[in-house]
Image (spheres, rainbow, N blue to C red):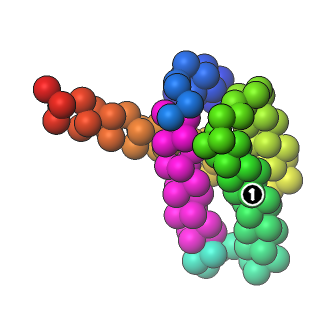
Amino acid sequence: MTFSQVIKWFSLKSDKEKIKFLELFLSEIIVMNRCFWSDPDTSSVEKIESLKWSNELTHRIWGLLFGLKRGDNNEIEDRLIGHINFYTKLSKELRSNLPSIIVLSVERFKRIEDKKNKSER
């Protein structure tokens, strides 16, 4: 699944589903950050830079989530794209890891929804 496919998929979701996806995405970012920190092949300077920009991205995603929970879904897809594009330009670790993290988040979302749908039958 490409980034543009993920955004199209995301845009078709209800606000409640978007909230769930963003929560899963934030969870995956936390795991990614742990991997950054514990990578023996990454210098301390690179680790700090990666975590700094990942923290800023997390802050922006949290803001989107906060707004959605309060009914503000104004241009959320464009804002999400803008944040991801901006922060991946600042960190090579984000640039190389975030695409797979986004796809993992979609896959987790779909598995959760599948389980929910099966249990409701």
Tell me which segment is drawn in magenta: 17-36
Amino acid type, mark 1: His
Magenta stretch containing residue 15, yes or no? Answer: no
Magenta stretch containing residue 25, yes or no? Answer: yes
Q: In this view, does 78 lie to the left or right of 23?
A: right
Where 21 falls versus 58 (above or below)? above
Q: How many marks?
A: 1
Residue in the image at 71% along x and 34% along y: 72
Q: In this view, does 78 lie to the left or right of 42?
A: right
Q: Which residue lies furthest to the left in this view?
A: 121
* Residue 34 position by quadrant: bottom right
Does any portion of residue 33 appear in the rendered image?
yes
- Out of 20 and 55, give the one closest to the viewer: 20
Residue 70, given in percent of the width and then of the height, sits at 65, 41
Residue in the image at 50% along x and 34% along y: 16
Q: In this view, does 113 lie to the left or right of 67?
A: left
Q: How crowded is mark 1: few (under 14 residues within 10 Å), some or many (20 or more)?
A: few
- Out of 45 and 101, give the one closest to the viewer: 101
Residue in the image at 81% along x and 49% along y: 87
- The quadrant of the image that shows the C terminus is top left
Q: Which residue in the structure is indicated by mark 1?
A: 59
Residue 90, given in percent of the width and then of the height, sits at 86, 53
- Dominant secondary-structure state across the stretch colored magenta: helix
Q: Is residue 65 left or right of residue 115?
A: right
* Residue 64 position by quadrant: top right
* Residue 35 position by quadrant: bottom right
